[in-house]
Amino acid sequence: MIYLINQTIFQQYEDINVNIKPERLKVFIKKAQELDLKPFLGYALYYQLITYCNDDGTIKDDAPQAYKDLLNGSEYLDEYGRIVLYEGLAPALVYFTFARFIENDAIYYTATGPVIKRHDNGDALSSPEIVKLVQQQRSIANAYTNDIEKFLRDNQENFPLWRYNEKNKSSRQSGPRIRGIDKNDFNYPGTINNYNLPITEFLN
């Protein structure tokens, strides 16, 4: 597994306890890469990027400049001649990782089931507070992901493997989402021939 960020990069954006072991943080970096970054970039582009990376997550010297810029960031002119400062993949990946870390760190798994952690040096956050904090981190990650999307759009000719997918944008929102509702007799009474009738027909 090639990790695109590490604890040193992480601490450039968020101050986490120095006692957190790098191996523990890697668990959440892996999840963020596999479950957040890879679906956004698309499997083809993601795996192409990984092939251009060294085992320590840095970009290879002989990698195309476009992929160096994608990973590490760059300054470029957009189609309107405006200077764009793109920060690379690290900020989004850090905050996706942080959200997953907070969410998991609040729970301790015992032999009898999951429980909320208690701390000697402070009170544990309530579940709503944890949800709000996780959503805040994901919102930050999503903002940085919008920058990645702009970079890929502005440099589309260098990334033929990337395909914009509108569903990707809705799937990475910080709050709850409803992707669709299946019509059936449970939530939409009647036969298939009745599906186009106004709902008031079923309330009489």
Image: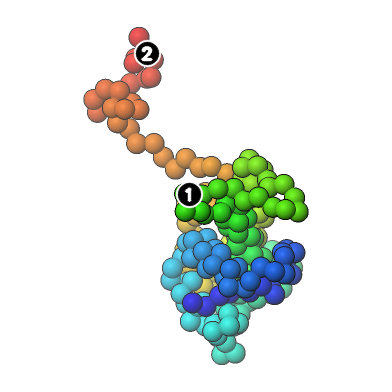
Name of the residue lying farthest toward the bottom: 62
In-front residue for pair 112/204: 112
Which quadrant of the figure has residue 105?
bottom right
**Mark 2 falls on what kind of element?**
loop
In-front residue for pair 119/91: 119
In the depicted structure, whether residue 124 falls above or below residue 152: above
Q: Label 2 sits on what residue type?
A: Leu
Q: Residue at x 62, y 73 (%)?
A: 22
Q: Position of residue 32 (x, y in %)?
A: 54, 63
**Mark 1 falls on what kind of element?**
strand
- 189 sits to left or right of 24: left
Say whether disc 2 or disc 1 marks the residue closer to the N-terminus: 1
Which quadrant of the figure has residue 85?
bottom right
Q: Label 1 sits on what residue type?
A: Gly
| Disc 2 versus disc 1: nearer the observer | 1
Q: Position of residue 204 (x, y in %)?
A: 35, 9
Q: Residue at x 24, y 28 (%)?
A: 192
Q: Residue at x 53, y 42 (%)?
A: 176
Residue at which label 2 appears = 203
Q: Position of residue 156 (x, y in %)?
A: 54, 69
Q: Residues within 10 Å of mark 2 (few under 14, many from 20)?
A: few
**Can see residue 12?**
yes
In-front residue for pair 105/72: 105
**Can see residue 85?**
no
Residue at which label 1 appears = 113
Q: Position of residue 159 (x, y in %)?
A: 51, 73
In the depicted structure, whether residue 8 falls above or below residue 198: below
